[in-house]
Image: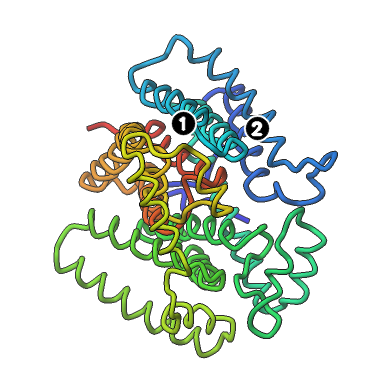
Amino acid sequence: MINRFNQSRSTMILDGNNACKSGQSNKKCLLFYMIIFLYFFFGKWKVFTFFHISTDYLFWGVIAAVLAIIVFIERKKQVSISMLPFLIYLGYQFIEMERSSYMTTARPTFIFNVLTIFTFFYVKNRKGHERYFIKCLYIGGIYYSFSVVIQSVFPDFLNKVRENLLVDADVAFGLRGYENSTRYLAGLAPNAAISAFFIAMMVAICFAQIVLDDNRLKNIIYFIIGIISLLLTQKRSLALGIFLSIIIVYLLFRKGIARRFRFLMILLIVGSVSLYVMYRIMPAMTIFMNRLFHNEDVMSGRSGMYSIMETWFQSNQMLGVGIGTANSIFGYGGHNCYQQLLGEEGIIGCLIYGVMIIPYIVSLLKKLKICWNAQEMGRNTAILLSASICVVTILIYALVGNPFYDFTFCLTFFMLLAISTQVDIEE
C-alpha cells in the first residue's frame, strides 16, 4: 500500500527497513509494532477473540506485562531523574484509586496508566522506532478512511459487515441517521471516535509530507480522502482539532508573516469551498453541517457534566474525589480531560501530570524548530512535524473528548511524546 518516498530526498518517513541498526533489534522493533498495529486496528475483530476475550485484554494483560518485565530488566540501571515524575504519578494514582468510591472503574484506570507508562519507557530513547510507529498510524488511518467512505456509499453492506466482524460494534446506534446510513460513520472501527482519531493522525502525517514535497500527489489524495472521511464520522472536535493544530504548528514555524497570512487565507478559502461542495453532493455530510450550525445544544449535554466536575473540584481542591468517578457516574469520561483530571485528582494530580508530559511536548517542538530553522527538510523534520501536529491535535481534542482516559488514545499520545527522545538533533 505504501511506496517508498523519493529516494533523492532523505525523508523516507515510512521506510522502516533501516530503522534499527542490528538485526536482533530490528526483529524486536518489528514484533513490537506488529502487536501495536494489531491491537489498534484489528483488536475488536471477532476472529481475534479467544475464549470470549478480545485482544484488548490480551494486550493489556499479556503483552504489557511482558513490556513491564523488559523495562525492569533492560533499564533498571538507567533509572534517571526523568522517570521520577512518572513513578510519583503512579504512586499518587494508586492512592487516588484506594480513596475512590468507585473501585470498579478506578482499578482499570490505574492499570491502563501503569501499562501506558511502561510502554512509554519501553520505546523511550530507542532510535529508529519512530518510523515504525508513524508508519503504523499512516496505514491505519488510510484503512479507516476508506472503510468510512465505503460505509457512506454502501451503508447497509458495511453495517452488516460490522455486525458480523466486530466484537462489540454498536450496531443499533450505527443504524440511526440519514437514509439508513450511520449517523456517526465508523467504518470498521468499533465506534466513530476511534475511527476519527486515527484518521486525524493520518491526515497530520500526510500534511507533513505535502509540506516537505515527499510523494506530494499521493499524499494530497490521501489527505483529501482523510478530510472527507473525518467529516463523515461527525466528530466535530477532531475535525476542528486537526484543522487548528495544522494552523498552529505550521504558522509557528513558517518564516515570513506575509507567507503565513497567505497560507492561512488560502487554507480557509479552499476549506470553505470544499466543505460547501461536499455538503451539496454528499447527503451524509448534511448531518455534520447541522451539528455545527443548526444544533441548539452545541456541547451535546456536556455543559452539565462540566458543572458536576466543577463541584468535585470544589469539594476537595487539592486531592479531588478520586479516579474512576467520571466513568462511574457518566458511564464514560467527562469529555474534558483537563477538568476531569482536576476534579478527580485535584491540583496535586494536575501538577504531577503536567511535570510528566510538558517536558516532552516542549522537547518535541524544540527539535522541530531546530530542524525547521536549519532548513533540514529530511526524515527527522517529517517525523517531528507529523508528531507535533498529532500531539497538538490530541491536546485540543482533550478539551471536549477523553483521549487521556481511553487506553488506545492515551497509549498513542505517550508513544508520540516518546518520539522526542528517539530523534537525534544536533543543536
- Indicate the quadrant where residue 368 lies: top left
Q: Is residue 180 left or right of residue 238?
A: right
Q: Nearer the viewer, residue 107 or 205?
A: 107
| Residue 215 drawn at (x, y percent) | 46, 59
Q: Which residue position is annotated with label 1?
A: 96
The residue drawn where x is 15% and y is 69% is 258
First reached walking from the N terminus: tag 1 or tag 2: 2
Q: Is residue 31 above or below residue 54?
A: above
Residue plotted at (25% across, 76% down):
265
| Viewer-side residue, 118 vs 219 | 118
- Farthest residue, direction front: 315
Closer to us: 136 or 289: 289
Residue 56, x across and y down, in percent: 68, 41
Q: Does residue 219 show up?
A: yes
The residue lying furthest to the bottom in this view is 280
Q: Secondary structure at mark 1?
A: helix
Hey, what amino acid is under mark 2? Leu
The part of the image, by quadrant, that contains residue 244 is bottom left
* Label 1 environment density (alpha carbons within 10 Å; few <14, some 14–19, many ≥20): many
Q: Residue 207, percent across and down?
A: 41, 60
On-image quarter of the N terminus: bottom right
Please rate how many residues cluster around mark 2, counting C-alpha atoms within 10 Å: few if below 14, some from 14 to 19, many from 20: few
Q: To which residue does mark 2 refer?
A: 31
Towards the viewer: 298 or 199: 298
**What residue sits 65% from the left and 76% below the top?**
152
Residue 47 image offset from top left, x and y in percent: 82, 48
Q: Identity of the amino acid at label 1?
A: Glu
**Numbered disc 2: secondary structure:** helix
For residue 18, say whether it is visible.
no
Q: CA distance from mark 1 to mark 2?
A: 35 Å
Quadrant assignment for the C terminus: top left
Q: Of circles 1 and 2, which is in front?
A: 1
